[in-house]
């Protein structure tokens, strides 16, 4: 396991899923949480964190918690219930979304949201992530064309890809789990997000004249800017802000905020790199058990042997295995370590394509 996780606690971020099936001719779904919680506890987890940024997601998570014994309901924490983290992720990815016009670039933006959101929630909770999102999005990096993006969008794509490639796959001695852990000392997800927000803030302030009246700007922009300027990661940008303000004839947003509000000590929690953990072939038994326990008599929908539904911001997405793919998860697990390592090395090499487009 990642050495940054305390040996006495093992929290895990779990994206809530519904196991979907058919019963009495009707499409039905049930939370995987009661079964997933039992599996996670058996593997050593002592806390399960479920992000639920939309009321529908909160309702589903609460229904799953009701399926737990009274003594175990406190095992689960529902977080980001106002959607603040998700909104910040989407704001960060918005320049990319506006410029992604075709596959695979569109896919990278969508998958990048999954990855970045999970990283940020897990970093806040100092938890691991039960998800394949890092390995899935990593596989797209070698085939995207950075030239599809211009200006700030291309820089954010480079930051996102660099963060993805900071996760190196490896096997851990923890049952059938495989993990991808952050290995280098690069900027964390929160560093990247906050710096981008501050640059946008500085740019907007210059356009609307706030740099000439920095104290008024502080009152109007409120807590968001206060949280940003207290982070050491924005110190270089504070200097840019001060220079821009001087050029505009103002007293300097950077200088005023540093003197009036100070810069807080570095938050080491933000430097935590949460590991990603995959269940591999255990995914199919988990689905079957969730369906059998929660909806006795229900069967998978026609044509599939497994179907999950996930909500994100109120919108549904699905993952499934088709009939005849019973051995797919097992076969992937056998070759997973080697294939993940190959994909990882290809993705890291592909980072050079941001400046050298013809590198293979």
Image (cartoon, rainbow, N blue to C red):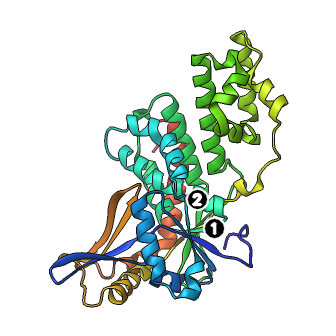
Rendered view: 165 above or below 358: below
Tag 1 residue: 127
Q: Residue at x 72, y 54 (%)?
A: 271
Rendered view: 29 above or below 165: below
Q: Residues within 10 Å of mark 1 (few under 14, many from 20)?
A: many
Q: In this view, does 28 lie to the left or right of 43?
A: left
Residue 232 appears anywhere in the view = yes
| Quadrant holding the C terminus | top left
Residue 355 appears anywhere in the view = no
**Residue occupying the far left of the picture:** 25
> Image quadrant of residue 251?
top right
Q: Nearer the viewer, residue 23 or 147?
A: 23
> Image quadrant of residue 159?
top right
**Residue occupying the far top of the picture:** 249
Q: What element carries label 2?
A: helix
Q: Are circles 1 and 2 on residues that touch, CB within 8 Å? A: yes
Q: What element carries label 1?
A: loop
Q: Is residue 187 left or right of residue 150?
A: right
- In the rendered image, residue 232, in percent from the top left (x then y), is placed at 77, 41
| Quadrant holding the N terminus | bottom right
Q: Where residue 144 is drawn, which disc sits there?
A: none
Rendered view: 279 above or below 191: below
> Image quadrant of residue 198?
top right
The earlier-in-sequence mark between 1 and 2 is 2
Q: Residue at x 60, y 79 (%)?
A: 74
Q: Which residue is drawn at 64% across and 41% down?
A: 194
Q: Is residue 209 left or right of residue 251?
A: left
Tag 2 residue: 121
């Amino acid at each position: 396991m990642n050495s940054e996780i305390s040996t006495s606690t093992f929290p895990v971020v779990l994206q809530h899923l519904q196991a979907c099936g058919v019963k009495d001719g009707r499409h039905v779904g049930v939370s995987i949480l009661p079964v997933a919680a039992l599996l996670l506890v058996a593997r050593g987890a002592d806390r399960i964190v479920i992000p639920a940024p939309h009321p529908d997601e909160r309702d589903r998570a609460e229904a799953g918690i009701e399926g737990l014994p009274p003594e175990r309901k406190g095992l689960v924490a529902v977080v980001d219930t106002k959607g603040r983290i998700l909104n910040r992720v989407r704001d960060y990815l918005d320049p990319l979304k506006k410029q992604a016009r075709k596959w695979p670039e569109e896919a990278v933006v969508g998958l990048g949201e999954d990855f970045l959101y999970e990283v940020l929630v897990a970093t806040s909770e100092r938890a691991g992530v039960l998800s394949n999102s890092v390995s899935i999005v990593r596989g797209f990096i070698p085939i995207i064309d950075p030239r599809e993006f211009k200006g700030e969008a291309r820089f954010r794509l480079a930051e996102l890809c660099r963060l993805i490639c900071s996760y190196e796959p490896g096997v851990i001695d923890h049952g059938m789990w495989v993990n991808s852990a952050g290995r280098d000392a690069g900027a964390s997800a929160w560093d990247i997000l906050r710096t981008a927000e501050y640059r946008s803030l500085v740019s907007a302030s210059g356009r609307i004249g706030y740099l000439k009246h920095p104290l008024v700007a502080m009152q109007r922009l409120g807590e968001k800017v206060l949280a940003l300027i207290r982070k050491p990661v924005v110190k270089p940008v504070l200097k840019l802000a001060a220079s821009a303000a001087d050029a505009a004839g103002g007293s300097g947003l950077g200088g005023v905020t540093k003197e009036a509000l100070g810069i807080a000590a570095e938050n080491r929690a933000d430097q935590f790199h949460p590991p990603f953990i995959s269940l591999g072939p255990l995914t199919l038994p988990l689905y079957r058990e969730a369906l059998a326990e929660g909806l006795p008599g229900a069967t998978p929908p026609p044509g599939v042997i497994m179907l999950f539904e996930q909500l994100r911001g109120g919108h549904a997405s699905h993952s499934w295995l088709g009939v005849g793919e019973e051995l797919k998860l097992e076969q992937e697990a056998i070759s997973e370590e080697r294939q993940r390592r190959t994909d990882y090395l290809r993705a890291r090499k592909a980072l050079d394509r941001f400046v050298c487009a013809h590198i293979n």
